[in-house]
Image: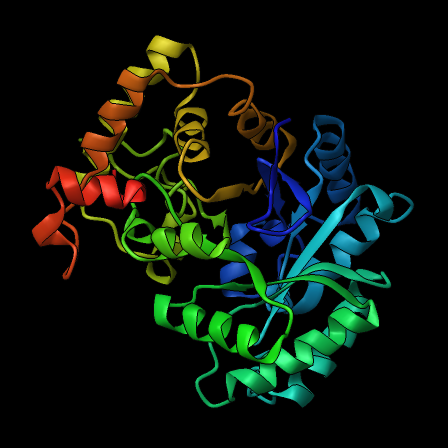
Amino acid sequence: MEYRRLGSSGVKVPALGFGAGTFGGRGELFGNWGTVGVDEARRLVDICLDAGVTLFDTADVYSDGASEEVLGAALKGRRDRALVATKTSLPMGDDDPGGSSRSRLIVACEAALRRLDTDHIDLFQLHAFDAGTPVEEALSTLDDLVRSGKVRYLGVSNFAGWQLMKCLSAADRHHLTKYVAHQVYYSLVGRDYEWELMPLGLDQGVGAIVWSPLGWGRLTGRVRRGQPLPADSRLHQTAAYGPAVPDELLYSVVDTLDEIAEETDRTVPQVALNWLLRRPTVSSVLIGARNEAQLRENLGAVGWELTPDQVARLDAASATTAPYPYYPYQNLEGFTQLNPSLV
C-alpha cells in the first residue's frame, strides 16, 4: 500500500481508505448501501489491515450512529493499528438541528467517542458548512478538542471553495488548528472538484479524501450503454440521493473504461480508482464494500499504474465544459501552466 501525507499535516494515510457507510444498515438510504454487522465488519477490517488500509471513515449520521458502533466493535483490540475518521454537523433526527455550534460540536464529539469505543478521533470532520454559526466559534471549539487530546486532526466535507477559504483564513488570524483534509465527491463522471477546490487544496495544503469514487455506483462495470439497469442495483433506490450524471457522459466513460480494463487485465472499478489515485491533491480514496468480494476487487486498484495514454483517453472521455469563470480559459496553454490542477 502507498501512503501519502494528509494535506500539509505530518500524518500519512493510505492511498485507499475504507468507507464504513455500509456498516449498520439503518434507514432508507443507508439500509440500501449495506447491512454489514459486527461479525462481517471484523472480517472486512481484517482484510483492510492486512492490505495496509489503515484509514476508516464513518459519520454520526450513517445509519443513525450504528456505523460508528459497528466500526468501533470491529476495531476492538487493534485500535492502535487504525486511523479513525468521523464526521458531524448534519442533523441526527428530528430533535437535532445539527450545525457546528460550540455546544453541538462538544456533544457530538463525546457521542462519537462513546459509539466508536475509543478515547480519541484521528480525523474529526464537519460534514457540512453551518452558515448560522460564526466560523471562529466552530474553529475555536475544534481547537479545544485537539488540545484536549480527543481529536488529532481536523477536516471538512462538501464545503464550497469560499467557505473553506474563509475557515482557513480565520484559523490563521486567530492561531487555531487548521483543516488539513477535505472529503469530497470526485470521480470520472463527477470532476467538478477540479475547478476550484483542487487549486485551493494545492495552494493551501488541504488533502482530498474522495468519497463515492465510482460515481455513486455507476462505475462498477454493471451499467452499460444499451442495457437495462440490473434489477439488484442499489441505484434503483439511491440514485435520487446522489449527484446526477448525464447518460451520454456515463456511457462514454464506461466505454473507455471497458477498453482499458481489457488492455490492463483489470476490472472497470480498478481502472476508475487508479485514475483517481494519479490526480493532484488526492490523499486517500475511500472504497466501500458490502462484502469481501467487493473489497478485494477494489483493493486491486493499487500496485500498478495506468499509462499516460490511458490516462489521456479517460481524461478526454470524462471531460465536460468548465463552469464560469473557468471556461474562457479552459483550453489556453498559458492558463493551464499557471493552474496545473486543471490539466
Looking at the picture, does residue 35 appear above or below residue 93?
above
Tell which of 277 and 217 is nearer to you: 277
Q: Residue at x 59, y 81 (%)?
A: 138
User: Taking the image as drawn, is residue 128 in sight?
Assistant: no
Q: Among all residues in the image, which is located at the extreme left?
A: 328
On screen, residue 281 versus residue 36, left or right, reads left
Find residue 42 and report its image quarter.
Answer: top right
Find residue 310 and report its image quarter.
Answer: top left
Q: Which residue is drawn at 41% across and 35% down?
A: 276
User: Taking the image as drawn, is residue 167 in sight?
Assistant: yes
Quadrant (top left/top right/bottom left/bottom right) for the C terminus: top left
On screen, residue 9 versus residue 337, left or right, reads right
Q: Which residue is drawn at 85% across and 61% down?
A: 117
Tell which of 266 and 223 is nearer to you: 266
Q: How many marks?
A: 0
| Image location of residue 72, percent across then percent down | 80, 55
Quadrant (top left/top right/bottom left/bottom right) for the N terminus: top right
| Image location of residue 65, percent across then percent down | 68, 67
Tell which of 293 and 248 is nearer to you: 248
Tell which of 253 and 195 is nearer to you: 195
| Image location of residue 244, percent across then percent down | 27, 55
On screen, residue 32 versus residue 80, left or right, reads left
Q: Residue at x 65, y 81 (%)?
A: 140
Looking at the picture, does residue 134 appear above or below residue 10?
below
Q: Among all residues in the image, which is located at the extreme right?
A: 77
Find residue 289 and report its image quarter.
Answer: top right
